[in-house]
Amino acid sequence: MSNLDRVLATLRQRLGPGGVTEDPAIIAPRLREWRDRFHGRAPAWIRPASTDELAEVLGICHEAQVPVVPQGGNTGLCGGAIPDDSGRQLLLGLDRMNRVLEVDADGGSLTVEAGCVLARVQAAAREAGRLFALSLASEGSAQIGGCVSTNAGGTNVLRYGTAREQVLGLEVVLADGRVLDLLRSLRKDTAGYDLKQWFIGAEGTLGVISKVCARLHPLPGPLETAVVGLRDPATALALLGVLRDALGNALSAFELFPRQGLELVLDYRPAARDPLGRPQPWYVLLEAESPRVHAEDGVLSGVLAAAMERGLVADAALARSLGEARGFWALRDELSAAQKHAGPSIKHDIAVPLSAMGQFIEEATALAGRLIPGCRVLAFGHVGDGNVHFNVGCPPGLSPPVFLARWDEVAEAVHDLAIAHGGTPSAEHGIGQLKVGELARLRGGTELELMRGLKRMLDPRGILNPGKLFGA
Ligand SMILES: Cc1cc2nc3c(=O)[nH]c(=O)nc-3n(C[C@H](O)[C@H](O)[C@H](O)COP(=O)(O)OP(=O)(O)OC[C@H]3O[C@@H](n4cnc5c(N)ncnc54)[C@H](O)[C@@H]3O)c2cc1C
C-alpha cells in the first residue's frame, strides 16, 4: 500500500463517506481552470465539514508528506487551485464549511466559514441591513476563502478596497494541523505583528483559511449607474478626476472597456443592448451613490453634462430603472465570458499608477501589434483602481496553438512595460501557476527571499499547494 493509499484510507475512516469524494466524474470539473488553460489530476476531493476535521486532514497529510491543493469555487484565473498532473496531490475543498456564523450589524462585522460563497455572504449582510462590499462577476461561485486567498478586487475597490480591506480577522489551519485563531473583529489591534496579513493573497501556500470575520458597511443609498462614451483611456482618467472631485467617496465603480469588447458581448448575448445611440471608441461604466433616486435629477447628470461641455464625454446614458442598470452591468460582467467564447487570448492583469494608465494602454497596444501583427487587443477593467486586464487576442487566420506558444514572450514584454511605469504584473488575480516565472523574474532579491523564508517556516514539508507562487 502506498503512502497516498494509506492516507486516503485514514481519511475515509475519519471523515466518513461525505468527506472523501473519489468519483472521477464528480472531481473532473474541479481539475480544470475556468479558462481551460490548466488541467491536473487528483485521486480524491477531500471535504472536511469543520475546522476540527480540516485540522485533522492537514495533520495526517503533513505527517505522511502528502500534498494538498486548497480549492474554493475554482474561479481563479491563474491555475492556483488546480493540482499538478502527477495524480499524487489531494484536492481540498471547503464547500461543506459554508455556514454564516454571526452577523453583528451594530458592530459592523460578520463571521462566516471560508467555504461560504460570496453571493451568500453578501445576502447575509443585506438581510441585516448592511453591505459586504466585495463584488466580482464570479460571486455566484467564488468562496470567501478563495477571495481572501487571492486578495480579490472586483468592481467596488474604488470605494471600499480589496478583499484585504474587508478582513478583520481570520482562522487559519496551518500545514501541520495547528489552528491559528486570529478571528477578531477589532478595528484596532497593535499587539505585535499582524499575522493575518500573511495569509491574505497567499493563494493557499501558507495555511488554509477556515473562517473569516469581515467588515460590514452601511448600505449605500440609491445608486446611479451610467455608461459614457469617450475618446480614449487618457480621457477616461481625466473624467475620473472630475468625478472624484464632484462626488468624492460616493463614486463606487469606474470600469473601462473598448468598443471591440462591447461588440463581443453584443454578439455573445443576443439580449444585450448597445447603450448609446452611436458607437464610441471607448466606454466607461460608472456607479455612484446618489441622494436622489431618479436619474434625471440625480447627481450624475449634472456632473456628466459639465464633463461633456469640457469635451471629456462624447455621449452618456443614465440608467432610468434597476433593470436598465442591471443591463449596463451585464455588458461589463459578460466581457470575460464573451472574450473566452471569441477565441484564445494572452491575458494580463496589470496595475499601474493612475497617472500612467493612458500611456500604458497606448504603448502596450503598439507593443502587442509589433510582436503579433494583426492581434486584437482588448484592454478593459477596473481602471479606477489603476487595474487593466490587457488581453491580446489571436489574429484571424493564425492557428491558436501557434499563437499561444508566444504567451511567455508577449507576457514578459507587457510586464516589463508595466514595471517601467511603476506597475505590477498581478493586480488582483494572483500568481498561481501562470506567473511563477514572472514572480521570480520581477520580484527577485530580498523580497522573494523573504517570501520563500515565510513559506519554509509555515510549511516546512512543502505540502501546501506545491508548485504555486514559487514553482517546483
Ligand atoms: C467571470 C469571472 C470574473 C472574475 N472577476 C474578478 C474580479 O473582478 N476581480 C478579481 O479579483 N477576481 C476575479 N475573478 C477571479 C476569481 O473569481 C477570484 O480570484 C476569486 O477570488 C477566486 O475565488 P475561488 O473561491 O473561486 O478560489 P479558487 O479559484 O478555488 O482558488 C484560488 C486560490 O485560493 C486558494 N484557496 C481557495 N480557498 C482557500 C482557502 N480556504 N484557504 C487557503 N487558500 C485557498 C487556492 O489554492 C488558489 O490558490 C473572476 C473570475 C471569473 C471566472
Image (cartoon, rainbow, N blue to C red):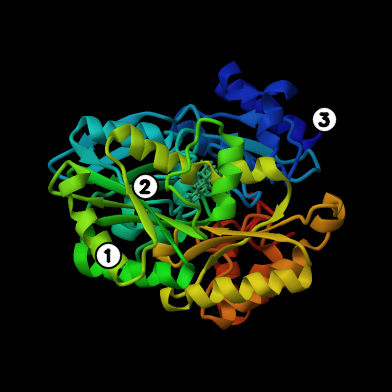
Q: Element at badge 3? A: loop
- Disc tally is 3
Q: Quadrant of the N terminus?
A: top right
Q: Which residue is mark 1?
A: 243
Residue 79, given in percent of the width and then of the height, sits at 66, 49
Going from N to C along the chain, the mark reached first, 1 or 3, is 3
Residue 390, given in percent of the width and then of the height, sits at 60, 62
What is the distance, in whole Å, between disc 1 and disc 2 at their CAs? 22 Å
Residue at screen point 73% across, 49% down:
344
Q: Which residue is mark 2?
A: 134
Q: Nearer the viewer, mark 1 or mark 2?
A: 1
Q: Element at badge 1? A: helix
Q: Element at badge 2? A: loop
Dot 1: within a 10 Å radius of its alpha carbon, few (fewer than 14), some, or many (20 or more) residues? many
Q: Is mark 2 within 8 Å of ligand 1?
A: no
For residue 171, side relative to residue 150 (left or right): left
Q: Nearer the viewer, mark 1 or mark 3?
A: 1
Callout 2 amino acid: Leu
